[in-house]
Image: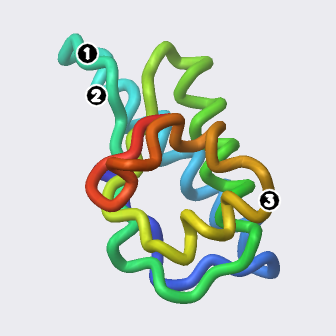
Amino acid sequence: MLKLPQSVRVDAAPALWLSLQASLRAEAAQVSSGAGAELSINAAELQQFDSAVLTLLLSAARLCAELGLRLTVLNVPAKLQELARVYGVAELLWPDLQDAGQAVQT
């Protein structure tokens, strides 16, 4: 399972995306070879973030969809859910927000 770091800010987002993209592709290969259809990212350690985290998650969800997988974000902080609502992308990341505190599928 992949993990988001403690901090995701716009200044570090490009390097983080390169790393996350490579990790997503590697994890997707393992999941697909095991006949899985879901890839998970744990957001439990995420404490400091700005809107760049939304860009990363949307990009990750798009990449997973291209690879034929569904992205699930686990342990989504309430502030991240609220930020997604403010930016109008919550329904893109989490169609069913009632379960967002535990596991959120995208």
How far is the residue under mark 2 from the one under mark 1? 5 Å
Q: Which residue is mark 1?
A: 33
Q: Which mark is residue 87?
A: 3
Mark toward the viewer: 2 or 3: 3
| Number of other residues with Cα within 10 Å of mark 3, as a class: few under 14, some 14 to 19, many 20 or more | few
> Where does residue 44 sit, x and y in percent of width and height?
33, 72
Q: Quadrant of residue 96?
A: top left
Mark 2 residue type: Gln
- At 58% from the left and 36% from the top, the residue drawn is 61
Q: In what element is the residue under mark 3?
A: loop
Q: Earlier in the sequence, mark 2 or mark 3?
A: 2
Q: Which residue is mark 2?
A: 30
- At 41% from the left and 64% from the top, the residue drawn is 76
- At 81% from the left and 81% from the top, the residue drawn is 11
Direction from residue 44 to residue 10 in the image, left or right: right
Q: Are marks 2 and 3 in contact (CB under 8 Å)?
A: no
In the picture as drawn, the residue positioned furthest to the left comes out as 34
